[in-house]
Image (cartoon, helix red, strand yellow):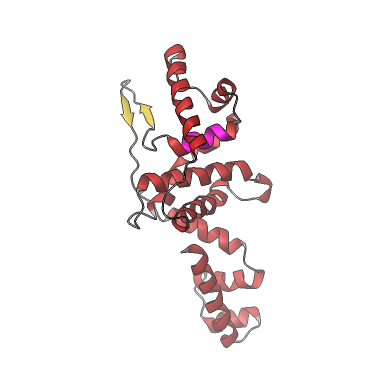
Amino acid sequence: MVERELTVSENLGLVHACAGRFRGRGIEYDDLFQAGCIGLIKAADNFDPDLGYKFSTYAVPVIIGEIKRMFRDGGAVKVSRSLKELGLKINRETEAFVKANGREPTVTELSEKLSEKPELITEAISACAPPVSLTVTNDDGEIQTDIPVDAPDGKITEIMSLRTELERLEDKDRKIIDLRFYKHKTQSETAKDLGMTQVQVSRRERKILMSLREKLI
């Protein structure tokens, strides 16, 4: 569980970057971030390193999918009453633990204290805790709040999502995209390399791009 907690904490930047893509669409950023955190947790739980992908490549589509689901569900992160109650218990237990130990408890420690599954603890924290609560101590010992801001390389999430979808294409379709948009060949040159006609390449390219657009927007 320690590894899982580390994976989630180290990749919160992905959630901020993904949530930033949906700013100005009628849903508060805090709700976008909470939905993204749920996606990040799901990605951490289901990621299989044997697939050969980096975790970030796998996680970004999952995070974005969870945010899009919130739009489909009416624009709010729905938190059950039981989850809210657990969130309150976690807050009380955390305050008591900090006073006694001088640090915040881990998910595993909260799980043992409250006799709840670690994944439920993590879900309650993500759903109920304020997302702008990350703090760090600088070299002078001062506590600073890490306010979410747009990542300077916000386009990275789009690139990761695109790479994931390209890897899922059939071999010939992937070659068409590679020749046309990465090697900058004309449709005629691409057709010659792949043993196709220019018309076939044009039609196939249009279908591929329409499919990618539907998946990424």
Give the mark count.
Answer: 0
Up-down relation of residue 71 to residue 29 (above or below): below
Q: Residue at x 57, y 51 (%)?
A: 58
Up-down relation of residue 150 to residue 72 (above or below): above
Q: Would you identify the image quadrant in which residue 177 lies? A: bottom right
Q: Is residue 28 left or right of residue 88?
A: left
Residue 14 shows in this picture: no
Q: State yes or no: residue 135 in magenta.
A: no
Q: Residue at x 52, y 37 (%)?
A: 123
Up-down relation of residue 130 to residue 111 (above or below): below
Q: Residue at x 50, y 35 (%)?
A: 83
Q: Is residue 48 left or right of residue 56?
A: right
Q: Quadrant of the N terminus?
A: top right
Residue 110, percent from left and from top: 54, 24
Q: Would you identify the image quadrant in which residue 117 lies? A: top right
Closest to the observer, 73 or 6: 73
From this viewpoint, which residue is outermost toward the top?
100
Residue 133, percent from left and from top: 37, 33
Residue 203, percent from left and from top: 56, 83
From this viewpoint, which residue is outermost toward the front?
81
Closest to the observer, 182 or 64: 64
From this viewpoint, which residue is outermost toward the right?
50
Report the magenta stretch's main SS.
helix
Range shown magenta: 120-126
Residue 24, percent from left and from top: 32, 56
Residue 68 shows in this picture: yes
Q: Residue at x 47, y 17 (%)?
A: 97
